[in-house]
Image (cartoon, grey):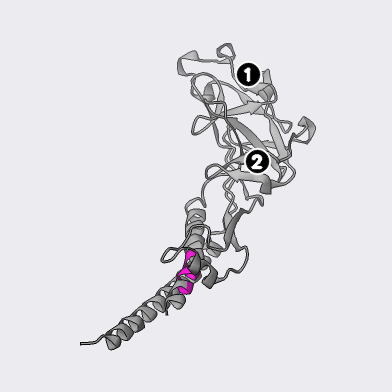
Amino acid sequence: MLKEIYTAAMGMVPQQTRLEVTANNLANASTPGFKRANVFERNLISARGHFNNVPEQVEQDDPPIGSYTDFSQGAMQQTENVLDLAIGNEKGFFVLQDEAGNRFLTRSGHFKLTTEGTIAAMDGKMLLGNSGELNIKRDFLVDDANFENSSNVKLEVNSKGEVIANGNNIGAVQIVEVDDPNQLTRSSNAYFVPKAEANVSNVPQEAADVRQGWIENSNVNIINEMVSMIELQRMFELGSKVIQTNNDTLDKSIGMGRFY
């Protein structure tokens, strides 16, 4: 009886993981550059072997499930915002750097102009160029009184990633390519960090294919995710009913076996 309860519970744990992943995909359906996650079964395990391993405890390493990221390109949307950038190369990534010097790869091209004159993501991470940070000097600006307003500078980004502010070339956006995207580890919803063995290389400017005024949307299909969530909820409820039925049967068996 305990084995049946344990087996049902082990079947519910992967379903719970799938529900969490699906819910996160739905929550980020409108996040620019977000790449949907999915799960898969790694291998079948012996319920008896794990039951004998640690009695009365389901171990975190027991569920035969793993996750992966779908790096397929999301739909391109024209925004007409001069600080919105998209990459035509499906394997290309922008390079961002935080205040601690940590670098991240992302397909999210929704940027802003900071008060220091740097082009940065909405959370403050700097967009890197081939020669370091991209900084629009104050003498390039028409109105220094409102420096953070990008309308005060004529900003152009051509298909090669070259950034031109008021006619001055301030550098080129760094675009890198990862041979195997599966060597990337998700850092946050739209940010990734390459593993030590990942092969990351700079994309030549002539092959950069940067599109100003466009942004890459999430590659999440809301309808598919909703259908998947409904199916997973039904399977999870089925496992819960199996446990409840076996638990009730066990209670009755214990009651019948009591001596008065």
Q: Considering the image in quadrants, where does the C terminus appear?
A: bottom left
Q: Is residue 232 visible?
A: no
Earlier along the polypeptide chain: callout 2 or callout 1?
A: 1
For the residue pair 3 and 216, the one nearer the viewer reads as: 3
Q: Do we see residue 138 in this rendering?
A: yes
Amino acid type for the residue under numbered disc 2: Lys
Q: Which residue is mark 1?
A: 166
* Magenta stretch encompasses residue 1: no
Residue 170 point in image, percent of width and height: 66, 19
Q: Is residue 203 above or below residue 258?
A: above
Q: Quadrant of the N terminus?
A: bottom left
The span shown in magenta is 7-13
Q: Residues within 10 Å of mark 2 (few under 14, many from 20)?
A: few
Taking depth in this image into account, of 259 and 50 the one nearest to the observer is 259
Which disc number belongs to residue 176? none
Q: Position of residue 98 (x, y in %)?
A: 54, 28
In the image, is 2 to the left or to the right of 217?
left
At label 1, the amino acid type is Asn
Residue 9 counted in the magenta span: yes
Residue 56 versus residue 147 in the image, above or below: below
Q: Residue at x 62, y 63 (%)?
A: 42
The picture quadrant where one finds residue 67 is bottom right
Assign the magenta stretch its main secondary structure.
Answer: helix
